[in-house]
Amino acid sequence: MDPITIRNMLEEILNKAEIVPGQDGNVYARIYLDEDETEVATVIVPSAEFRRWVSRKFCSVTGQFPPSSMLTEVIANCAADFCGIRIGLQVGIRICQSDSGRTYIDLADETGRAIAVSSEGWVITPQPDVIFPNNTYRRALPEPEPGGTINAIAEKFALSPSDVVLIVSWLLVCLRGSGPYPVLVITGPDGSGKSTLATFIRDLVDPSNLPLRALPSGEKDLATHASANFVLGFDNITSIPDSLGDALYRIAKGTIFTGSRAGREEVFFQGQRPIILVGACEFLSRPNLIRHSLVIRLKKRPAQQCKNQRDMTRVLADVRPSLLGALLDAMVKGLGRLELADAGPAKELGMPEFEKWIDVCEHGLWERGTFFAAYEANCSAAAEDVVELNPALAALRQVVGQNGFCGTAGELLALLNAQYKGARGNRWPGTPRGLSGLLRREAYVLSDMEIELDIKKGRNRDRLIVINCVGKAVDVCPEPA
């Protein structure tokens, strides 16, 4: 075949693909992978998968594959036509909000369909107004059933009513597709079903062929994982390094990870992701992370309740469609109330966007005020966890609970050293400056402990620290000249 004929045939094949620019700067193609045009994939135009699709189409007509150089040139020209266009469609992973205000949830069932959710209701649409690129490890989401209930969660895992409220609230903020997201923490002894519950919750929003993974080694590994998955699930956690704990907190509320590659700065990830952490309770000592978390504490299940994993997976798969339908129904009501400005939490406990969203969604799920009662108890328990796992704060509570304190950081450290006789660990401040830094960082924890902190002005060594229990003031020492 002469080159002009080959080029014309390749361009004709490209015209059969629905090519759309994305707002992320990439160009995407919606292609049919079978002759019946029922199996749909959305891929980046210069990708290897797109090249294979064009080559197979060309071979099915001519019986031979096109020259590699000409194939590359034709595809590059196609992508160049959309280069620099930023007025395309929104690009998302599993859940994405379109410019029109609708929220789309990718079914990922090889049909290209998605669930469109708005204040008017939810419906499965074959042509979403957003782009969901294909992913090998992403599993199909079940088609939701209208009129479902959330009771199945409590029945299958023997959860307390407050635990069900926290889990449903976390799922609702995930389905909305915009954060900041609270971190879902599941702790408990071995045999309590932590991993099974975490996998079930993740599969209600973002099913995956991969199991829950271990904590990443650093920010770059975390950014790679977040770029390919919507829900980030980590299992078997015993402790979280300081740098990684901060990165997890930042990615839940929204952040950007950059790095150097081939001598140039590059963005590895930009956005927000909901996170599930599963493991022992020791990692609850991360203050900035646990303050923005919903903690589910499981108890060891009786032997008769422990079922074969395969049977448990099958039973849970049967209830997912009705659960998803119930969550979508609540989401529709919430969007309607949000548009009517019939919203606004009675009090803010640390995450106002999350609190406002659940406040408008909870009608029809439970009595109004149930969420705030469960959420406030969760925040109080989280503060208690931080205190119990931080020996310096535990010792401070003992000291202040007796007589309060007024003096310098050095005097307070000497008092704490004399008061606390248990194992101190590496988190115990070794210097007065370290103690002052601890008090400033954990000021909100002290507030939850009903402890008032006031650091007076002055020179470093002479600066006074006044600490009182709420309602029990001590005599304030005169400030240094």
Image (spheres, rainbow, N blue to C red):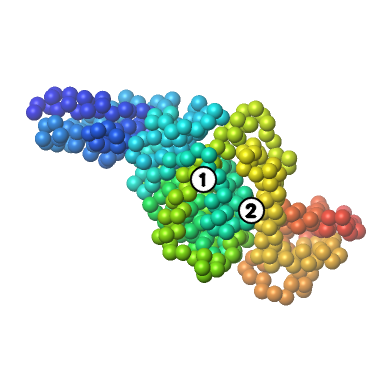
Q: Is residue 100 depicted above or below 350 in this figure?
A: above
- 10 Å crowding of disc 1: few (<14), some (14-19), many (20+): many
Q: Is residue 204 left or right of residue 281?
A: left
| Number of on-image labels | 2
- Which residue occupies 72% across, 57% down? 439
Give the amino acid type for the residue marked by disc 2 in the picture: Pro
Image coords of residue 97 (percent x, y): 50, 33
Q: Quadrant of residue 314?
A: bottom left
Image coords of residue 233 (percent x, y): 48, 53
Image coords of residue 182 (percent x, y): 59, 48
**SS type, badge 2:** helix
Q: Quadrant of residue 241?
A: bottom right
Give the amino acid type for the residue marked by disc 1 in the picture: Leu
Q: Judge by depth and name the residue closer to the eye, 77 or 249.
A: 249
Residue where numbered disc 1 is placed = 323
Image coords of residue 52 (percent x, y): 23, 39
Residue where numbered disc 2 is placed = 161
Q: Is residue 430 left or right of residue 209?
A: right
- Which residue occupies 19% across, 37% down? 56
**SS type, badge 1:** helix
- Which residue occupies 19% across, 36% down? 55
Q: Judge by depth and name the residue closer to the eye, 364 or 170.
A: 364
Do labels 2 and 1 touch, CB within 8 Å? no
